[in-house]
Amino acid sequence: MIGILDYGMGNLRSVQKALEYLGGRAVISSELSVLDGCDRLILPGVGSFAAGMDNLGKTGLADYVRTRAADTPVLGICLGMQFLLTVSEEEGEHGGLGLIDGRAVRFTQGKIPHMGWNGVSQMRSPLFAGIPEETQFYFVHSYYADVAVEDAIGMTEYYRTFASAIARGNAYGVQFHPEKSGAAGLQLLRNFMRL
């Protein structure tokens, strides 16, 4: 069972539908007792970092994810990936979950938000098993993860090279939307289900 964390923001149903298409069982919930029965957690996200972290804090999900990540695979998608970081510079400086050292930093070049299909390279994680280098995924974001080289498991070019996929321990994050990225996105979700 995969738990999709409901903190009042995010494309929850589309992620659930993608997992169900792959034959997985997924529940959308903010109830810790329900999420306790899940062996994978997904933290989707669309919107403001500060508002999202505030909601995660108020619901108790922030501390819950920090605790569960010790022995449970957690996947952050788009804003959900940025929540995994130490801090975000969006609308001032706001603390994240701190599962992966790094900062969410705003793009300073190109059209913002970075929106559309873009390639991911330098893939080095079981998350990308069976996915060729430079496969295109769908992005919509204004901030990117500035992380240490060892925590970057996928890289993308958009006026600069940035980490479009990150990982440390059981915490994984992708800046793109796998649920909107066709066959490659489904393969990535399938890989997450097999971790």
Image (tube, rainbow, N blue to C red):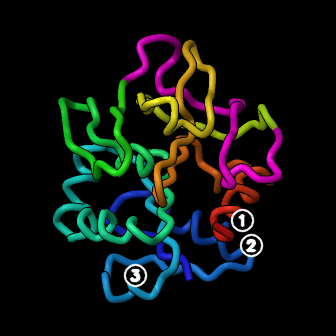
Helix, strand or loop under label 2: loop
Q: Camera-side residue: 65 or 141?
A: 65
Rendered view: 92 above or below 75: above
- At label 2, counting other C-alpha atoms closer than 10 Å, the crowd grade (few under 14, some 14-19, many 20 or more) is few
Rendered view: 49 above or below 6: above
The span from disc 1 to disc 2 (Cα, nearest Å) is 7 Å
* Direction from residue 189 to residue 47 in the image, left or right: left
Q: Camera-side residue: 74 or 26?
A: 74
Helix, strand or loop under label 3: helix
Q: Camera-side residue: 31 or 68?
A: 68
Tell me the kind of residue under disc 2: Leu
Q: At which x and y percent is residue 139?
A: 59, 37
Residues at circles 3 and 2 in contact by the CB criterion of under 8 Å: no
Q: At which x and y percent is residue 177?
A: 59, 48
Q: Quadrant of the C terminus?
A: bottom right
Q: At which x and y percent is residue 107?
A: 43, 19
Is 145 one of the magenta-colored residues? Answer: no
Residue at point 38%, 87% (across, down) = 34
Residues at circles 1 and 2 in contact by the CB criterion of under 8 Å: yes
N-terminal-most mark, 3 or 2? 2
Q: Which mark is residue 190?
A: 1
N-terminal-most mark, 3 or 1? 3
Point out the frontmost of discs 3 and 2. 3
Tell me the kind of residue under disc 1: Arg
Helix, strand or loop under label 1: helix
* Direction from residue 117 to residue 149 in the image, left or right: left
Q: Which mark is residue 35?
A: 3
- At label 3, counting other C-alpha atoms closer than 10 Å, the crowd grade (few under 14, some 14-19, many 20 or more) is many
The span from disc 3 to disc 1 (Cα, nearest Å) is 20 Å
The residue beneath circle 2 is 22
Q: Which residues are magenta?
A: 106-132
Q: At which x and y percent is residue 54?
A: 19, 55
